Amino acid sequence: METLRRLLRDPDGATAVEYGLLAALISVGLLIGLQNFSGALLDMLTFITETLEDAWV
């Protein structure tokens, strides 16, 4: 706990905390975006697979 207080008082520590929060926000945004993209990608791959299977028979 003391280390966290020291980081918050130190200007360099505050900058590190800000960068950590920024990285966390970017990570959450990427995860949400990739989750939406994965559904669309799965739909497209399913469509391609079904089309190829129908053409093969």
Image (cartoon, rainbow, N blue to C red):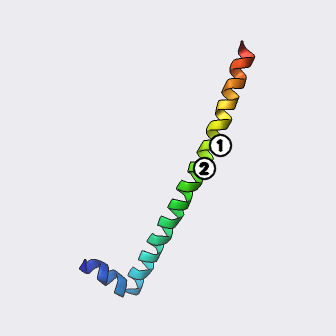
Give the Cα distance between marks 1 and 2.
Answer: 7 Å
Seen in the image, is 31 located left or right of residue 5? right
Residue at the location (65% across, 37% down)? Answer: 43
Q: Quadrant of the C terminus?
A: top right
Find residue 42 and report its image quarter. top right
* Outermost residue toward the left in this view: 2
Asked if marks 1 and 2 touch (Cβ < 8 Å), the reply is yes
Find residue 36 and name its label. Answer: 2
Q: Is residue 31 above or below residue 47?
A: below
Seen in the image, is 6 located left or right of residue 23? left
**SS type, badge 2:** helix
Q: Disc 1 residue type?
A: Ala
Seen in the image, is 37 located left or right of residue 26? right
- Where is residue 37 shown, x and y percent of the image? 62, 48
* Outermost residue toward the top in this view: 57
Read off the residue under disc 1.
Answer: 40
* Outermost residue toward the right in this view: 55
Q: Is residue 11 above or below residue 54?
A: below
Find residue 12 and report its image quarter. bottom left
6 or 54: which is nearer to us? 54
- Where is residue 45 shown, x and y percent of the image? 65, 33
Find residue 19 and name its label. Answer: none
Q: Is residue 13 above or below residue 43?
A: below
12 or 43: which is nearer to us? 43
